[in-house]
Image: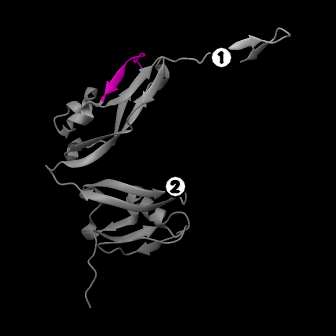
């Protein structure tokens, strides 16, 4: 009988939520499925934050492996992780990724802030990968906007962003307007809305 191909992780020990020293011996390809409370999200959390509960081949640790989390499928109704996709990072090779846009100093803006983009798609070598891009909007006035091309990430020589994305507006500020209401006076001289 053929033996299963082993993964770089030889053992996963779960000590979270309802698990106490529960051991999983993963193979090269693993599918975790089950009912709510079966432990799928617990396994995903263990990969993300509990490296001491992962036993690697030949005494290695997670920092020996450069991977990028490409996608996480999460079911918000069941509150569980369905699938996590990884991509191996190789030195000198650029990979596709996205950076989350975080607006800062929102409270200093005089006007209505409209955020047009939530993330920036880009391609970069592993040394230039970023998860978030902070955009300071504190000094924007009505009529002002910021495009992707205005950001430092767009000027980084190790990052490639397509020309059409560089021209996209991330955030703009408009004048705050108030709707006027028409009022008439009734027979008693009191104001009433028309």
Q: Quadrant of residue 183?
A: top right
The image position of residue 48, as x and y in percent, is: 39, 56
> 135 above or below 82?
above
Mark 2 vs mark 1: give the one in front.
1
Task: Look at the image and say whether residue 145 sits in the magenta stretch.
Answer: yes
Q: CA distance from mark 2 to mark 1?
A: 41 Å
Q: How dense is the environment of label 1, judged by Cα within 10 Å: few (below 14), some, or many (20 and up)?
A: few
> 79 above or below 184?
below
Q: How dense is the environment of label 2, judged by Cα within 10 Å: few (below 14), some, or many (20 and up)?
A: few
Q: Residue furthest left?
A: 92
- Residue in view at x 28 percent, y 29 percent: 151
> 9 above or below 142?
below
**Numbered range of the magenta stretch:** 138-147
Q: Which label's residue is closer to the chain start, 2 or 1?
A: 2
Disc 2 designates what residue? 76
Q: Is residue 108 left or right of residue 58?
A: right
The image position of residue 43, as x and y in percent, is: 44, 65
Disc 1 designates what residue? 181
Can you say which quadrant of the picture contains the C terminus? top right
Q: 119 or 49: which is nearer to us? A: 119
Q: 115 or 102: which is nearer to us? A: 115
Q: Quadrant of residue 70?
A: bottom left
């Amino acid at each position: 009988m053929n033996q299963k191909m082993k993964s770089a992780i030889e053992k996963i020990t779960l000590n979270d939520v309802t698990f106490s020293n529960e051991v999983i011996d993963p193979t090269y390809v693993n599918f975790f499925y089950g009912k709510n409370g079966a432990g799928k999200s617990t396994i995903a959390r263990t990969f993300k934050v509990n490296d001491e509960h992962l036993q690697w081949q030949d005494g290695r640790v997670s920092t020996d492996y450069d991977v990028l989390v490409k996608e996480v499928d999460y079911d918000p109704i069941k509150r569980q992780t369905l699938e996590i996709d990884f991509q191996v990072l190789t030195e000198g090779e650029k990979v596709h990724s996205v950076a989350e846009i975080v607006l800062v100093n929102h409270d200093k803006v005089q006007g209505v802030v409209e955020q047009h983009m939530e993330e920036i798609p880009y391609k970069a070598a592993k040394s230039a990968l970023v998860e978030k891009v902070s955009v300071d909007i504190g000094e924007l006035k009505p009529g002002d906007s910021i495009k992707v091309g205005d950001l430092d990430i767009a000027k980084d020589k190790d990052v490639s962003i397509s020309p059409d994305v560089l021209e996209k507006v991330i955030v703009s500020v408009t004048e705050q307007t108030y709707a006027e209401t028409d009022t008439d006076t009734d027979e008693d001289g009191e104001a009433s809305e028309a």
